[in-house]
Image: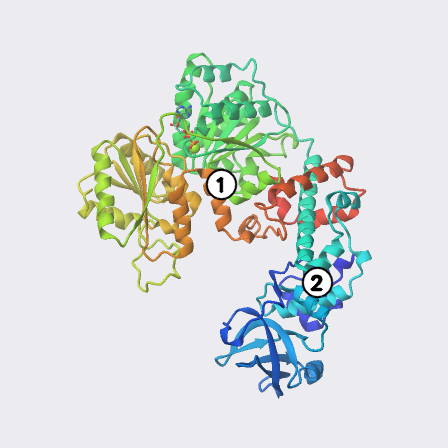
Amino acid sequence: MSALDIPLSLRLPRATARKLDAVGMRTVGDLLSLPPRRYDHWGALTRMSGLREGEDVTLLAEVVSQRLIPNRSRAGVRLEVTLTDGADQMAATFFAHSEYRLAPHRRLLIPGSTFLFAGRVGSFRGNLQLTHPQFEGAEDESEDDIRRRQERPIPIYPGGSGLTSWVIARAVAMVLDQLDDADVPDPVPEEVRTRRDVLAHAEALRLLHAPSSDLDHRRARQSLAFEEAFVLEAGLLAARAGVSGEQAPACPVSDNAVLEALLGHLPFTLTEAQRSALAEIQEDLSLTRPMQRLLQGDVGSGKTVVALAAMCQVVGAGHQAALLAPTGILAQQHAESLRRLLEPVRQAGREVPLRVLTGASGARARREVDEVVRGTDPAIVVGTHALLQDTVRFADLGLVVVDEQHRFGVAQRDRLRRPSGADGDSRRVAHQLVMTATPIPRTVAMTVFGDLDETRMTGLPPGRTPVRTYLVDAANAAWMDRVWARAREEVASGGRVYVVCPRIDEDDAVADADAEAPGGSRPPLASVAAVAQSLRASTPLAGLGIQELHGKMPQARKTQVMEDFTSGRAPVVVATTVVEIGVDIPEASLMVILDAQQFGLSQLHQLRGRVGRSERESVCLAVHRHEAGAATMERLRAFEGTTDGFELANEDLRLRREGDVLGADQSGHTSGLRFLSVQRDEALIRVAREEAADVVARDPRLAGHPDLAASVRARSGSDLVWMERS
Ligand code: ADP
Ligand code: MG
């Protein structure tokens, strides 16, 4: 058994082990892989007069008195020590089950002696105090001792659930004391460690928790980050090696009449970015190695036609292709543009059956789609989540395109890619192309980890003018008047106006993003119903065709609203974020987002992408609450500041807390990246991947690397789940 698998109950007092158990720490390894949140220094001394509750502080103080007090209501005692820094006084309190436990404290903390105390400032009955501070003698020390101590960082652990940093620090010290370094496994082979200057695992743990200098814990972190990346990459690569038998149909470009007909009759010239993206995809599709590619292209950059060409390549090679869209509106719209683009292909005598399946499709349409996909004839099927139902079984699916990938879960996408398994060859999978303008952090992570190939399309098709963005404070009545006047002008000059609200109606419960902001009885968040009503009644827009659009309406009604919007019969649509994604209406020129503080950066960016889709000048007005908090305003200013989707995705990463980056996987586990930062450690991850690839290439089953294999297995419960399926 490895030293890290030893239960904490064998190493720690029962009560401590129980407390740690309650937060999921059962073994020595669990405890030692908890990184300190930060490190304090003895050197940074504070005055008592300046203390604030909740601060972690280090004080130089003299003991004034000590008092042992039995607890009244429960068993145990507490030692109350009064401290002074010469000017002020405060208490330090130590609790224990019996006074014997406190004997060492009583012996040391005698009146008149001076110590350094480190801990968190709490308060008791209105007075500030330290509970269980760490303390060290500060008298009779040599210069050297003092210098060494000043250099030595004090680890501060994330507390919570009745666990203080102090309790954890004590537990860690006890566990380290009993740790036999020789029994600590090392997932990174020694040869790699030497080459990459990585510490042995045991040493890294010691320097992490008991550093002598800041340099120590930095080195420890660097080593542990490398190790983490190495284990993850080895897991990914080993999994890939294991499924390397998986094959997708090879779809050649040459002699592909469907593809030729399409490319020969496009209504526009492909941009340089589109051409090179397509070239990469064409090469992937011509191999049996399953393509796993992310196509990133900003809103409006023209991803659809690239996807269509990919589908035509597959269909022309005799297989089926599916395009998965997140909403019914978008699926319909895709189907229409595909039909238009495929028209010349049909005229060239290459009819490609095209079917649509959405939640609104009737039984007959479903049966028809089912018939098509069960047959082995080539076809393109466009659909929503409805395509993911078990009843839809493709007989010969060669390519899945997932549009607006950030709207789908991992498992959902996987269902199509890996069709049945039961009534077919389970090694046969479809190529996969996922598209997005606003990659979510997890996707960014997957590309950094190298598990998803990435194609970027930069720039917009010619003739587009970038959307101008302005923030509008809702409290400024003159500006709000101007917003609606501007809307009227847009319509008068042939434009279309979207007004987006965070809610459908007043009953629609939506978490208020800035609920903690001051303001007492704030007006309710804008809703589609209320806003449409008031726009019809009293603004400069009164008298114009104003329609409502939201996800709870029947599909037929939604389609009608979009038709009226396109034709100009109802040039103003008040909507929820159903218009967020993909919808392409060239006349749309003004996007008004109400209660914009409610939306995330990528949502805002997607909404803005609904306008600016022609040569017409377009504007996005993000109306926010006057009392929006600082973090919210930072997000909104980032949105105002750039129209570049990649830059915003990066900003999104930066504005989130590091721990949120990978988020929870489908089963609710957090990803558990402890030492790695996907953003900061890109270079390190690449090196780790190279080294791991080397090991896996020589030993795909990791038979000769038991420590590594064990670490990979230990992690595969959570992180690997999402990464190995992209
Ligand atoms: P997105 O990448 O946001 O999905 P779309 O594929 O919807 O963008 O394309 C946006 C619009 O640009 C569509 O109307 C499409 O027909 C048009 N388009 C795409 N490529 C070109 C091009 N090379 N030249 C001109 N217009 C193009
Ligand atoms: Mg799109």
Say above or below: 378 vs 295. above
| Residue receiving disc 2 | 210
The CA span between labels 1 and 2 is: 42 Å
Q: Quadrant of the N terminus?
A: bottom right
If you read the primary sequence from the N terminus, does the residue marked by circle 1 or circle 2 appear first?
2
Callouts 1 and 2 close, C-beta under 8 Å: no
Tag 1: amino acid: His
Q: Farthest residue in the front direction? A: 143
- The reply to whether the residue tagged 1 has its Cβ within 8 angstroms of ligand 2 is no
Seen from the viewer's position, the closer of residues 454 and 260 is 454
Q: Could you say which quadrant of the image residue 683 lies in? A: top right
Horizontal and vertical percent for residue 382?
46, 30
Horizontal and vertical percent for residue 317?
56, 19
Seen from the viewer's position, the closer of residues 596 and 554 is 596
Q: Is residue 584 visible?
A: yes
Seen from the viewer's position, the closer of residues 161 and 627 is 627
The tag on residue 51 is none
Determine the residue positioned at 20% across, 45% down.
536
* Direction from residue 565 to residue 138 in the image, left or right: right
* Direction from residue 641 to residue 128 in the image, left or right: right
Seen from the viewer's position, the closer of residues 194 and 540 is 194
Determine the residue positioned at 78% across, 35% down.
698
Say above or below: 38 vs 302. below
Q: Give SS at disc 1.
A: helix
Q: Give SS at disc 2.
A: loop
| Residue receiving disc 1 | 406
Horizontal and vertical percent for residue 667?
58, 50
Q: Could you say which quadrant of the image residue 416 lies in? A: top right
